Amino acid sequence: MDQDTTGPMTRRSLLKRAGGAATAGAVGAAATSTASAQSDLYGGYLSDTGNFDGATADATGMDTVTISVGAGNQGLLYDPAAVVIEPGTTVEWEWTGNGGAHNVYNDDALSSVNERLFESGEPVDATGVQYEFTFESSDTGTHPYACSPHRALGMRGVVVVGSDNVQGDTVPFGAEEESLNSVAIFGGAAVFGTTALLGLSAYREMFSEDDH
């Protein structure tokens, strides 16, 4: 006689679907939260910037801050994407040599002071190139900037002068990667916990039905 496996198979399928739905839901919620943070801050200027998760790197108290030009797997990012400094701080952009020719130019139309404060010049494809600019008290505000060849690909950044002008959360300068890892770990734990609860519920239901 053939064994009837319709019931148990259905329950197992239901459990798989429940676990998959929980995972997809948690991941989707995390993605929605990140997208919302990106689109709302700094006028959405960093909404397409891959390494901006809504947190601004806090470099207040530092005399000089270095930002990598050509960061990321494809070399099409500034790192960090957003940084807050105090007046009198010098920001130094340093080229990695990755991702092709890059430059740095202040998007004056979106800047708090409505004038182009800094511009490195023509795009350069080299390693170790440096460009620096010192932000004074008169420059207090937010200063969006971009790479002219790769602006449309999300290679953008924001320098915030003065803590009062920060939008969203801050993380210590240099700790952006650690912060992102913590978010990933927390999200994974949430997914695991939700899936485990759904699995336990389905398990109890299966044995409850088998008892009858």
Image: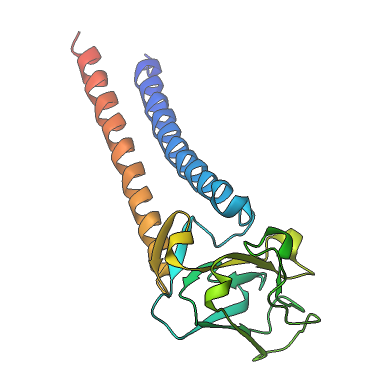
Q: Residue at x 35, y 56 (%)?
A: 185
Q: Residue at x 49, y 39 (%)?
A: 28
Q: Quadrant of the N terminus?
A: top left
Q: Residue furthest front?
A: 138
Residue 73, visible in the rendered structure: no
Q: Residue furthest bottom?
A: 128
Q: Residue at x 38, y 55 (%)?
A: 183
Q: Residue at x 61, y 51 (%)?
A: 43
Q: Quadrant of residue 13?
A: top left
Q: Quadrant of residue 107?
A: bottom right
Left or right position of 87 against 102: left
How did the renderer colour the structure?
rainbow
Residue 147 versus residue 37 in the image, above or below = below
Residue 184 versus residue 32 in the image, above or below = below
Q: Residue furthest left?
A: 211
Image coordinates of residue 20 in percent, x first then y, are 44, 35
Q: Quadrant of the C terminus?
A: top left
